[in-house]
Image (tube, helix red, strand yellow):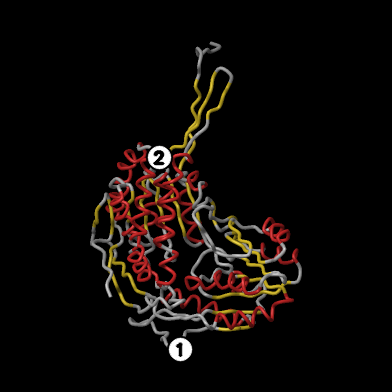
Amino acid sequence: MKAQPKASHFIDGEYVEDTAGTVIESIYPATGEVIAKLHAATPAIVEKAIASAKCAQKEWGAMSPTARGRILKKAAEIMRERNRELSELETLDTGKPIQETIVADATSGADSFEFFGGIIATALNGSQIPLGGDWAYTKRVPLGVVVGIGAWNYPQQIACWKGAPALAAGNAMVFKPSEMTPLGALKIAEILIEAGVPKGVYNVIQGDRDTGPLLVNHADVAKVSLTGSVPTGRKVAAAAAGSLKHVTMELGGKSPLIVFDDADMESAISGAMLGNFYSTGQVCSNGTRVFVHKAMKDRFLARLKERTEAIIIGDPQDEATQMGPMVSWAQREKVLGYIEKGKAEGATLVTGGGIPNNVSPSKGAGEGYYIQPTVFADVTDDMTIAREEIFGPVMCVLDFDDEAEVIGRANATEFGLSAGVFTADFSRAHRVVDQLEAGTLWINTYNLCPVEIPFGGSKQSGFGRENSAAALEHYSELKTVYVGMGKCEAPY
């Protein structure tokens, strides 16, 4: 099984290689097999990519919004035509089952290009301000060269979620995917060129932890958009602040999902499972603290256990498979460590907690990084598994009695990415979400993120927004022009 790209980087409309860069092995998580070898960007590659973007941005930014939009919508059409191919590559890159990638990854990226291609003709308009005899007007202008730094859980989607609004606003982008999932973004870059994006407008370079600072600290970079962990976000934001760069930070969370006693139980369990087990739990917005009212706790846990143990774990390329492996051996070990902490601190293990019987825990090639979907009950707020982001399929179920009590406990975290509420009482639903400290919330559903709505967090979970027309504000800046209609006079 091989997925070797033509070269490691895509710069100025073509594949580029520099074998002096550190070797990056792309590993298929279902088997541990190396499916591609790439090289991290050297300083010369970084310079080449940024110089290409800087040059190309002038031509791209000068095009009319309608012309840019037409090209982005063409890219969306091509992505949809090649959805199967892109989805299979995403499965190799991440280990996520094809059942999931075929509906949630490249398709979401295509939606992003189509949406921003369709709205920019009007969404980038400014305003006219009457000032008596004089007047003024505003216009939105591109920032210039934008750096996107991606995470490994949704590599193609993130490449598009950052690229679409950046390009729609007239910027050029240098995108660095995670070194664990380096393949998909290269195909996105190919498709954009095929759709008509000028060479150099969207570049992809590979890299590791040494590459990010070269991009973030570069004098020709106007903005950095990161999807990653809170510790990484703090470092990148601090570095960008040193040169007053624009930043969007889409970081982690420990999001609450509150289930009241009048909720439809099957629907609430579905929401909890989607908010904990989809993508093998590797989703930043997951509702990993599931607060269940004591009146329905026992029924909820019994049915949750039954449904969780029915999840089909197996070959990600089999369309019947519902859950694939973790992205890496190291990530699985991290999650298993949290499970042991949960046991040691007194949480009740309802189901899961280990490795499926048909796979081996060893690190050797040929072994998949599988883990059982895990549910803990009787979790208390002070337990490690209730406070720290695990980023794996581990659900923590906590009890509550009272609305005010659960709101206070839900907000008692440094994170503020997402939250959810399940209840039949819509007055209560809106009352509760108004008090929850999070940027993206759901009522009677969970983790749906269509491109039409803004996505992002508060507190330590980041700032700025992705998707929707709001994203264009974060990839452009306002220029104000005062027009004097008479003579200019001075008192001296």
Q: Cα distance, mark 2 to mark 1?
A: 55 Å
Q: Nearer the viewer, residue 301 or 253?
A: 301
Question: Is residue 351 positioned above or below 252 on the image?
Answer: below
Residue 267 in the figure: left or right of residue 76: right
Rendering coords of residue 248 (x, y %):
49, 51
Q: Nearer the viewer, residue 314 or 121?
A: 121
Question: Is residue 320 positioned above or below 165 on the image?
Answer: below
Residue 150 is labelled as none
Quarter of the picture containing the N terminus is bottom left
Mark 1 belongs to which amino acid? Asn
Task: Give the SS element for disc 1.
Answer: loop
Rendering coords of residue 258 (x, y %):
66, 67
Residue 356 in the figure: left or right of residue 47: right
Mark 2 belongs to which amino acid? Pro
Q: Nearer the viewer, residue 268 or 173?
A: 268
Q: Which residue is mark 1?
A: 357
Residue 477 in the figure: left or right of residue 172: right
Q: Where, by quadrant of the figure, is residue 268 drawn? A: bottom right
Q: Which residue is mark 2?
A: 65
Q: Pointers 2 and 1 in contact (CB under 8 A)? A: no
Q: Earlier in the sequence, mark 2 or mark 1?
A: 2
Density class for disc 2 (Cα within 10 Å; few <14, some 14-19, many ≥20) is many
Circle 2 or circle 1, nearest the eye: 2
Task: Give the SS element for disc 2.
Answer: helix
State the residue at coordinates (33%, 56%). Answer: 78
Rendering coords of residue 412 (x, y %):
67, 63
State the residue at coordinates (53%, 71%). Answer: 390
